[in-house]
Image: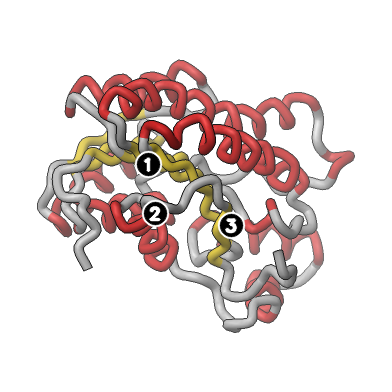
Amino acid sequence: MDFGLKDKVAFVAGGSQGIGKATAIELSKEGAKVVICALDDPELPNAVEEIRSIAGNEVIGIPANLTVTEDARNFIRKGVEHFGTIDILVNNAGGPPDKKFLEIDEDLWNLGFRLNLLSTITMTREAVPVMMEKRWGRIINMTSVSVKQPIEGLILSNTIRIGVVGLAKTLSNELAPYNITVNNVCPAYIATERVRKLSIDVAGKQGTTPGEIIHKWESQMAMGRMGKPEEVAALIAFLASERAAFITGDSIQIDGGYYKGVM
């Protein structure tokens, strides 16, 4: 199936590992030129080289701490300066710390806000004028199944990510006349380094083992297993394509049957 992404320019935040890297690889395999960002550490150039070697298309990496507004802004600006445009934006910034309500001070609330909502606003604000001018664009926000079914111990994520859903729903109406779609991808537990670390943290708090925590999470999903980053990436590539032109303003779960609601 041809997704029509050849020579499109795709920006993938948090693209050096996990779902972000899998997404960058998938888009590159579909023919897109890719810009990724991550903290300035060895993972970034290594990821750039890995993505390039797999797909053979041009990839660049830009160091950025997405909790810093200027970094989020420069990620888009520098990438547009290099490629001359932006067609696809994948807002993916990882997740905030796992804490209970009384464990979270104002600084942590601000961190979560900057990481998961303000960074999305900032990157989208930089990308939209370029997309409007060319009258085509795809904005895909990585959120969580927690926007539909809150997850115990993740109150920062449960609270802040829903703001991204409101942003996307509103923007989808504003930008539809320009052939720009805006959607949210809502995964449950995916086999990433973040989830592995989360299982260790939760196990320590509950006096059990990470393996038992992962087994518990897997038992909550109808498929009986965690998702793979590549499975999420395949959904994102579809939403970025011409074939998804009539999908906008939606929050799409990819959760192996974790969410039990009917709406």
Quick one: which residue is furthest to the right in this view?
102
Cβ atoms at labels 3 and 2 below 8 Å apart: no
**Which residue is the site of mark 2?**
239
Residue type highlighted by circle 2: Leu
Say whether residue 141 is left or right of residue 104.
left
Local crowd at mark 2 within 10 Å, few (<14), some, or many (≥20)?
many
The answer to which of marks 1 and 3 sits earlier in the sequence is 1
SS category of the residue bearing label 1? strand
Seen from this angle, which residue lies furthest top?
A: 70
Question: From what the image shows, is residue 129 above or below residue 27?
Answer: above
Q: Residue at x 33, y 29 (%)?
A: 131
If the image is split into quadrants, where does the C terminus sit? bottom right
Numbered disc in front, either 1 or 3 = 1
In the rendered view, does 90 fall on the left or right side of 84? right
Q: Earlier in the sequence, mark 3 or mark 2?
A: 3
Residue 100: percent from the left, percent from the top?
Answer: 83, 47
Where 135 sits versus 159, above or below? above
The mark lying in front, picked from 3 and 2, is 2
Where is residue 153 shown, x and y percent of the image? 78, 53
Residue at the location (76% across, 71% down)? 208
Residue 52 visible somewhere in the drawing: yes
> Where residue 166 is drawn, which disc sits there?
none
Residues packed near mark 3 inside 10 Å, few (<14), some (14 to 19) or many (20 plus):
few
Q: Residue 184, position in %: x, y?
A: 53, 49
Residue at disc 2, secondary structure: helix
Query: In the rendering, which numbered label is found on residue 138?
Result: 1
- Badge 1 or badge 2: first in the primary sequence: 1
Residue highlighted by disc 3? 197
Name which residue type carries label 3: Lys
In contact (CB < 8 Å): disc 1 and disc 2: yes
> Which amino acid does the dot numbered 1 rest on?
Arg
